[in-house]
Amino acid sequence: MPSNQNDTKFIIRKSRKISGTIPVKGAKNHALKVLAAAVLTDKDVKITNVPQIEDIQRKIELLELIGVKVKKEKDTLVLNAKNIKTTVLEPEKSSTIRTSIILAAALLSRFGKVSFYHPGGCILGKRPVDIFLLGFEKLGAKLSYKNKFIQVTAPRGRLVGGEFFFRRISVTATEALIIAAVLAKGKTILKNAALEPEIVALAKFLNGCGAKIRGAGTPTIQIEGVKKINGGLTRIIPDRIETATFVILGALHRAKLRISNCNPDHVEPLLERLIAAGANFRIGKNYIECLPYKGLEGTNVITHEYPGFATDIQPPFTVLMTQAKGQSLIHDPIFEGRLFFTDNLVQMGANIIMCDPHRIVVQGPTQLVGKKLASPDIRAGIALVLAGSIAHGETEIDNIYQIDRGYEKIDERLRKIGVNIIRI
C-alpha cells in the first residue's frame, strides 16, 4: 500500500472480459475488533488471515503508541499487550478510525480507565458515541470531559456486570460492550444485540482465551465476567462485503468468475435477490461461481441489519441495477447520506431519482460513461470502480485512500481477472 495517497488515483477503462478466480481476503470488521480485544490479555495473541489494508495499518500504529508489541509476517500478526504504557488514545490516530472505540472498551475493561477523542473513520463513520457511553455507564463507569477528551473510569478499577438494551441495533456497540464486560465483575446481559458473523467470531476467539460468553449471534448475549483471560490464536473469517462486491462484479459483466475462500451463507440475501432477478450462480461450500445469464430484471431491496441485506452491499448493488431492465427501488434506512454517492452515477449517465435521503428509484438499463470522480467512502468508492469497469471511456477516481481502507491491493487483484484499472 502506498504510504502517501493524497495524489494517487485510479484510472479505469471499460473491461472487455472478466474471468478467472478471485480469492476473498479476511474480514476487515472482524480483524479490527480482534486487534483491540488483544489488549485484554498480557499474553501473546496470534491472528492469521489479516487483510493488509489501510484501516488495519492505522489500528496497528495506534496499538503500538500505547505500548503493544506487534510482529508482522505477511497476513499473520502476533500481539503482546503486557507492557501498556498509557490508557490515553492519541487524538490524531484515533480520530482516523471508527473502531478506536473498541480499543477504548478493551482498555477500560482491563485497566478500569481510558481517555479518548471522538473516534473517526469515513464520513459515514462519524456517528454519535452516545450508545457506547450509555453502555459503559450501565457497567458502572463514570464519565467526564476534559480538554475535548472523553474520560471513562470504573470505580475501584473494575467494571461491574449489568443489563443493557440497545435502543438501536449496532454491531460496533455490541462488540464494544462484549469486550468491556469480559473482565467485569458479575454477569452482563446485552439485549437487542447485533447478530453479525463477526460478532460470533469475536466471541469464539474470546471464549478460546478463557472468557465466558453465551448467545453471540442471537439478540441476547450473556457474559460472565472473569478476572483475566489468556492469549490465543484465531483466523479472521472471510470478508462478506468483499465477497458480495466480487459477486456483483461478476453479475455486472455476466462473467464466468469464481469467488473463492468465502462463506456463501454470509451473502445469502444478495444471492437470493440476484437469482430472483435472473442472475446465475454455482454455489459450493467455500466458493461462489458467477455464470453467464440472459438478462437482469430490476428488483427492489431494503437494507437491514444481519441477516438482512447489508447496507455496505447497497452501493455496488445500485450500480448493478443501472444495468437491469425496468425499475428498482433501493431503500437504505441504516445511515444518513449513504445514497448521496448516486450523484456520481447520475454524472456517469445513470437514470436515478432520489425520493428522499433514504430512497432512490433506478431506471435501467443505461449506458454509463467515464467521468472524473472522487471516492466519498469505502463502499461508494468500490461501487464507482465497478461502474468504471462497464463505462464507455475513461473513469478517474480520486481519494482512493478510502477504498484502500477496506480492500487489499484491489487494483492488482482486479487486473488479474481482467478489469482494466491502473493506479497512478
Image (cartoon, rainbow, N blue to C red):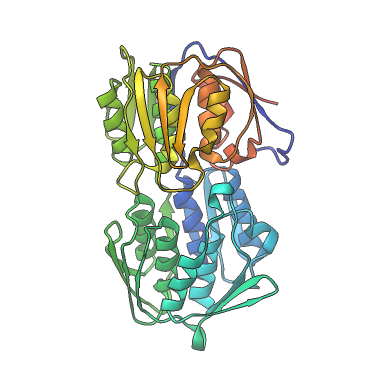
The residue located at (32%, 31%) in the rendering is: 300
Report the number of discs: 0
| Quadrant in which the N terminus appears | top right
Q: Nearer the viewer, residue 352 or 309?
A: 352
Q: Nearer the viewer, residue 198 or 270?
A: 270
The residue located at (49%, 80%) in the rendering is: 141
Residue 276, placed above or below residue 215: above
Instruction: Answer with left or right where residue 48 lies relative to residue 396.
Output: left
Q: Splitting the image into 4 quarters, where does residue 251 fall?
A: top left
Instruction: Answer with left or right where residue 278 lies relative to residue 252.
Output: left
The image position of residue 385, as x and y in percent, is: 55, 27
Q: Splitting the image into 4 quarters, where does residue 301 fall?
A: top left
The residue located at (61%, 13%) in the rendering is: 393
The image position of residue 381, as x and y in percent, is: 56, 34
Please say whether residue 160 is visible from this viewpoint.
yes
Residue 27, placed above or below residue 297: below
Q: Splitting the image into 4 quarters, where does residue 153 fall?
A: bottom right
The image position of residue 133, as x and y in percent, is: 49, 71
Q: Residue furthest front?
A: 355
Please say whether residue 238 is visible from this viewpoint.
no
Residue 71, placed above or below residue 101: above
The image position of residue 142, as x and y in percent, is: 52, 81
| Quadrant in which the C terminus appears | top right
Instruction: Answer with left or right where residue 42 lies relative to residue 275.
Output: right
